[in-house]
Amino acid sequence: MGRPADELACLWEFWLLPLVVALLPYRTGITFARWCAARLPLYDERARAGLAHYREARPRDDAREWLTEFRFTQLIDHADLFWALTRSERFLLSRLDAPSRPGAAPLMVISMHFGQGLVLLPWLRAGGAPARFLSVRFDATAFESRLRYLYARLRMRVVEKLAGVSAIYTGGARGEIAATFAQGGAVYGLIDVPTPVASPANATLFGAPIFWPSGLVDAARAAGVEMLLLTAYCGADGRRHVAAECTATASVADIAANFDARIDALPGAWHVWHVLPDFAASDVEAQALV
């Protein structure tokens, strides 16, 4: 059980405020979310840590704009859960500005912690590529509050509902991914995940050597399937802008370069600025990419 302060913060930032945003008329909810993001210290610990790393990587005089966009990104991402619970899939899909066809399965969908990805799951299914989301197994002790853990559990249930297929959990995931491809299915994973120990550099991000796990790319290449580099973000007008690019040959370095450009265009939409140092490559190997 988390501290009372942690539970109250989670209740407000993950449950009550996103629910209010989702229950308002859509455009009113978006406007209200922008107002809250510009004036309230939402997700403050993560936002302040992220801003410090952003300033180091991208020294620009836009701290206020970055904080507003970052907080808006978080709030809308959480509100998406409640929109998914209270609105139809037709309603969700009608807000997308997206290509008409995501790519034929079998397909490896590679994304990152950027913008809002929940509504991409029904879009993939509608395009003929229902995708099994790759997730870590949740352990209640890893969460700062009980309410945060319950939120994560609920979100995964909604993920599976929107995707139309079961999720894949780490620990035996390699075999599940291969079996999914063999059956003509699709897999959806996030590549910007920190590893417990420093590893050799396999890409650069913001001009610095980093390591991102190569498992998604390796699995796609082993099965000979295309990779779809996919992200979406919510604009100030509430439209969901989707960027989708298919490739058969991209490396982790290529994907990092592609995603670097997407982050650079809208830096506040990247969720994991606060853990940027955790992507750093081990010193010896990093020098090869400098």
Image (spheres, rainbow, N blue to C red):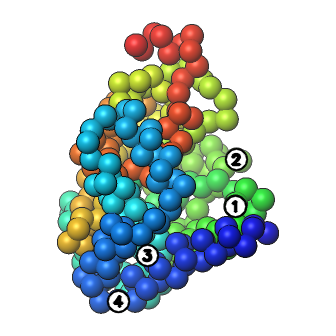
Which residue is labeled 4 in the image? Answer: 24
Tell me the crowding category of disc 3: few under 14, some 14 to 19, or many 20 or more residues within 10 angstroms, Cα based. Answer: many
In which quadrant of the rendered view does residue 232 lie? Answer: bottom left
Q: CA distance from mark 2 to mark 3?
A: 32 Å
Relative depth, front residue between 263 and 35: 35
Secondary structure, mark 3, is helix
Secondary structure, mark 2, is loop
Quadrant for the N terminus in the image = bottom right
Q: CA distance from mark 2 to mark 1?
A: 27 Å
Point 42% across, 69% down: residue: 40
Q: Is residue 146 left or right of residue 14?
A: right
Point 60% across, 71% down: residue: 10
The answer to whether mark 2 and mark 3 are in CB contact below 8 A is no
Point 32% across, 35% down: residue: 58
Relative depth, front residue between 66 and 138: 66
For marks 2 and 3 on the same chain, the one whose residue lies earlier in the sequence: 3
Amino acid type, callout 1:
Glu
Q: Provide residue 27's location: percent of width, then percent of height.
A: 24, 82
Q: Which mark is residue 172?
A: 2
The answer to whether mark 4 and mark 1 are in CB contact below 8 A is no
Relative depth, front residue between 31 and 120: 31
Quadrant for the C terminus in the image = top left
Which residue is labeled 1 in the image? Answer: 144
